[in-house]
Image: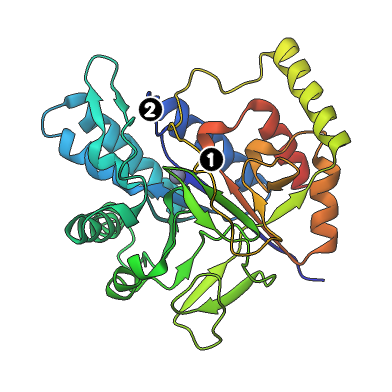
Amino acid sequence: MQKQLLVTFDYELFLGNRSGNIHDCMIEPTNRLMAIMAKHKIRSVFFVDTTYLLRLKKQSENSTQCAADFKTVATQLIDLVKQGHFVYPHVHPHWLDAIYDEKSNQWQLNDTTKYRIHNISDLEKAMVFNGSVKILEEILHPSFPDYKVNAYRAGGWCIQPFSDFKPYFLQNKIEYEFSVLGGIYQFTDAQYFDFSNAPQKTIYRFNDDVCIPEPDGPFTQYNISSIPLSNNKLMLNKLWLKLLYKLKGDHTFNKGEGQPSRILNGIKPVSDKGHDLSDTHWERISVELLTAVKMSAYKNFLDQNRYMHFISHPKMITNHNLVVFDNFLV
Ligand SMILES: [Zn+2]
């Protein structure tokens, strides 16, 4: 059976009180991932937080540190494409309200009012979406004039309602969509999505709703994979992580801080078959969640399915994750 292993990464800083720096969150972990993928001859997809790049470019006019960071990130994006990987936009609109601190060369993104594209004005939507496509083209086209920026993943999976995005998908000729985490939902004052009724199909065409397949629709959805985990496995994993931390200091702490969010009570998902994102018994397939304890569950998933779609974040990946990912690919 032909297997399709789709390895994707959200390439970004932390999106809350403290962003962290590009070296710890993006450059170094990505270099290590590139080495592993080159070894196994795998081409992957990087969804780049282009809203960060837009702010970084603007700040570069007044800051030599930001100008240097922009150049470093742009160079890595060119490297990624040179090595056969794909680079596409990933939009976190609350960068519009981010505050830069020159002293620490970090950003503060505590204001999550604009976390979803749904909550910004049409003018801002056009600015962040069209600007995101354009900034990647500006970085990549001098080296790869024919490179097509034609795929997308929404920040925090917030791709609903799709009517917020459709005009910009059409305008920018975006054909491929990677935001649906099938079967999962979350309702907070920042992240808000409901894929509880997403089709079981892994790849399907759609038109107006990312969860409703339409065979003649203009867009293609690539559903992100997830797996069930038993109580035993979760308990064992917890112990294993504690042990790794004790013995090897394996962790991602102190790189930065994620966005604050408050659960919105009383909202029901459209299907009762769905799982809440915070329920660890049903977990997305991800390099940063892959441990030696979960290896067999990942291997079983790949044995039983033709398609396996990883969603990972370089900023979250530990040494242990890299070792296990490398073994998984063997
Ligand atoms: Zn993101």
Q: Secondary structure at mark 1?
A: loop
Relative vertical location of residue 279 with respect to residue 208 in this rendering, above or below: above
Q: Which of the 4 image quarters holds residue 27?
A: top left
Q: Nearer the viewer, residue 197 or 246?
A: 197
Q: Position of residue 316 (x, y in %)?
A: 56, 32
Q: Is residue 260 visible?
A: yes
Which residue lies most toward the top here? 246
Relative side of 143 to 254, left or right: left
Q: Nearer the viewer, residue 272 or 191?
A: 272
- Classify mark 1 as within 8 Å of ligand 1 or not, answering yes or no: yes
The residue shown at (53%, 44%) is 265
Q: Position of residue 193 (x, y in %)?
A: 50, 55
Q: How many marks?
A: 2
Quadrant of the displayed image that contains ligand 1 = top left
Circle 2: residue type: Ser
Relative vertical location of residue 119 with respect to residue 307 in this rendering, above or below: above
Relative vertical location of residue 273 with respect to residue 235 in this rendering, above or below: below
Residue beneath disc 2: 19
Q: Position of residue 85 (x, y in %)?
A: 50, 55
Which residue lies most toward the front here? 266
The numbered dot on residue 313 is 1
Q: Residues within 10 Å of mark 2 (few under 14, many from 20)?
A: many
Which residue lies most toward the left here? 62
Which residue lies most toward the right here? 232
Q: Which of the 4 image quarters holds residue 172?
A: bottom left
The residue shown at (47%, 22%) is 255
Quadrant of the frame with the N terminus: bottom right
Q: Secondary structure at mark 2?
A: loop
Q: Earlier in the sequence, mark 1 or mark 2?
A: 2
Relative side of 75 to 199, left or right: left
CA gap between label 1 and label 2 equals 14 Å
